[in-house]
Image: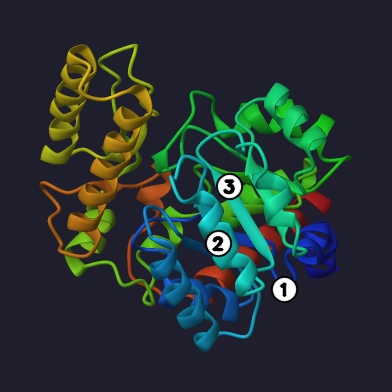
Amino acid sequence: MTSAKLVSLMARGTDFLGCETAILCGAMSWVSERHLVSAISNAGGFGVIACGAMTPDLLDTEIAATKALTDKPFGVNLITMHPQLFELIEVCSKHDVGHVVLAGGLPPKGSIAAIKARGAKLLCFAPALSLAKKLARSGVDALIIEGMEAGGHIGPVATSVLAQEILPEMSPQLPVFVAGGIGRGEAIAGYLEMGAAGVQLGTRFACAAESIAHPAFKKAFFRASARDAIASVQIDPRLPVIPVRALKNMGTEAFTAKQREVANLLDSGAVDMNEAQLQIEHYWAGALRRAVIDGDVEGGSLMAGQSVGMVSKEEPVAEIIAQLMAEAASALERRAA
């Protein structure tokens, strides 16, 4: 009965995603690539390729490689500020990608129509109720609400507050997935009962056996506690820097210096605001690569959510998903007793 209850609560999400379990893997640059994405989809979840700063050719290769490893549905996460966004959308259309996630701000003019032109479903991040309503009116198919506990780029509001604010009003209209600080199935059960169609987890999957992350990167996660995952500081109010949550190291300090450098370029007129933002994004992409691929855990960026304290060992994706589902089912059983 409890498993049936969990399946029932997740039905809207699984129907929307076309998978067995309404658990998305958050798009993590350099981590969410063909191996992890295909493993998550093959295990019944929903993998999402992190396009990040990829060129259209690189994304084309990555999607093809992922399709060679799984015949299950998966999505692609695109960054709204990418200068080749519409070319990336074309690549997704070429491969008949069924779900596109837009992150990093409101969808640029024409992007929603371009994504949906070939039948793809569009998910967008909604950091506030007002934006959730605006996105729904603009035609997005589903929302992701992500709290400040998450890893990588974050907003200022906690997951539990966003869920209370947004789910009651928006979940009757379209599927809403909850993300940020989720590390156990009990939390998943709670958000499903509040009206969520499913959840998104990133940090919990970053150190999976199928993740290509460097062993040193994974060890840093295993040693960390929730309080080690801190948010970056914005030093110049003119510079539109979205805070990033990562494990504190020398790379955190280097980002502060990078902000000063870019602010000086703005002052001199050497770059405009858009270019300044892109430089910040490229910094993070490079710093994350040094940590994930090269194993530079001191100078690179160890992007992690506050759920990192619940990541203690390397496990296969299938076992992670099975454990989360068992915990969720058990929680629902206890509440029904």
**Residue 320 image position (x, y, % from top left):** 50, 69
**Residue 234 image position (x, y, % from top left):** 30, 20
Q: Nearer the viewer, mark 2 or mark 1?
A: 2
Instruction: Using residue 60 as the reference point, say whether residue 144 is left or right of it.
Output: right
| Secondary structure type for disc 3 | strand
Identify the residue shown where x is 55% and y is 82%.
67
Relative height, residue 127 to residue 13 (above, below)? above
Tell me, yes or no, if residue 25 can be seen here: no
Which is more toward the observer, 49 or 228?
A: 49
**Residue 159 image position (x, y, % from top left):** 58, 34
Identify the residue shown where x is 32% and y is 67%.
313
Q: Earlier in the sequence, mark 2 or mark 3?
A: 2
Tell me, yes or no, if residue 202 can be seen here: yes
Which is more toward the observer, 92 or 160?
A: 92
Identify the residue shown where x is 15% and y is 40%.
251
Which quadrant holds the N terminus?
Answer: bottom right
Identity of the amino acid at label 3? Leu
**Residue 187 image position (x, y, % from top left):** 62, 47
Instruction: Classify residue 254 by image quadrant.
Output: top left
Q: Distance between the residues labelled 2 and 3?
A: 9 Å
**The label number, if any, that marks residue 76 in the structure image:** 2
Identify the residue shown where x is 67% and y is 42%.
110
Instruction: Classify residue 106 by image quadrant.
Output: top right
| Secondary structure type for disc 1 | loop
Instruction: Using residue 296 as the reference point, say whether residue 66 is left or right of it.
Output: right
Using a 10 Å C-alpha cutoff, classify the residue at mark 1 as few (fewer than 14 neighbours), some (14 to 19) or many (20 or more): some
Read off the residue under disc 3: 102
Q: Which colour scheme is used?
A: rainbow
Which is more toward the observer, 61 or 336?
A: 61
**The label number, if any, that marks residue 20 in the structure image:** 1
